[in-house]
Image (cartoon, rainbow, N blue to C red):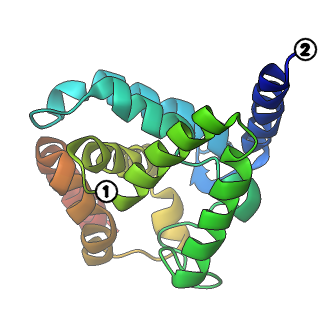
Amino acid sequence: MTDRLAAQLAFLAEADRLKTVLRASTLNDGSRRENSGEHSWHVMLYAAVLGDQAGPGVSIDRVIRMLLIHDLVEIDVGDTPIHAQNGTAHGSADLLAREQAAAARIFGLLPPDQAASFRALWDEFEAAQTPDAVFAKSIDRVQPVMQNLASGGGTWTDYDVTRAQLESRVGTKVARGAPGIWSHLAPLLDRWFAAR
């Protein structure tokens, strides 16, 4: 076996560990918590189905590739719920540094050319400056919203999330890359929060 193939297979074996990372979000039926591998698959499907909601110049193939690898760092750092109020805050300097270290380790398992390519794509997603990354970030935020609506509130209930918090933490990011989706969801969310 070549060194290149051995490195690729080692990376793939390591990536399997993403299936063991439990997220705060439950499945739509509320029966159990979703794992990060399931989340990655589901957001890729969201991007494929909702690609017509992307802005001009967005490459859905690149978006799907970003979403495929976006959470691999959770193998080392775990999932940090966006609404959690304790522990390492979502977006904190500490968490970002740990994610950078995880990205270096995990993508570093690949042959150098693939490591550089995957890392660049992950960095692009994290920076959320290109049209592809902005749409990918939007879709990554839409999926948990849909799961919380389907499961009767899910993490919103667990973390006592308000409509205003949801708007600032999630809505602005979704609206930036997929305004039509957020416009559709806003009245559904208003009704859900009003009924609480």
**Which of the marked residues, 1 or 2, is nearer the chain's N terminus?**
2
- Residue 101 picture location, percent across and down: 67, 65
Give the residue displayed 62% in from the left and 81% down from the top: 88
Give the residue displayed 39% in from the left and 49% down from the top: 149
Q: Quadrant of the N terminus?
A: top right
Left or right, 31 with reference to 51: right
Q: Secondary structure at mark 1?
A: loop
Tell me the residue that label 2 is attached to.
1
Give the residue displayed 47% in from the left and 75% down from the top: 91
**Nearer to me, 159 or 78:** 78
| Figure disc tally | 2
Quadrant of res 175: bottom left
Q: Secondary structure at mark 2?
A: loop
Left or right, 94 with reference to 164: right
Can you see residue 28?
A: no
Q: Quadrant of the C terminus?
A: bottom left
Tell me the residue that label 1 is attached to.
128
Structural crowding at the residue carrying mark 2, measured as other residues with C-alpha within 10 Å and reported as few (<14), some (14–19) or many (≥20): few
189, above or below 140, in the image: below
- Residue 124 picture location, percent across and down: 38, 51
49, above or below 153, in the image: above
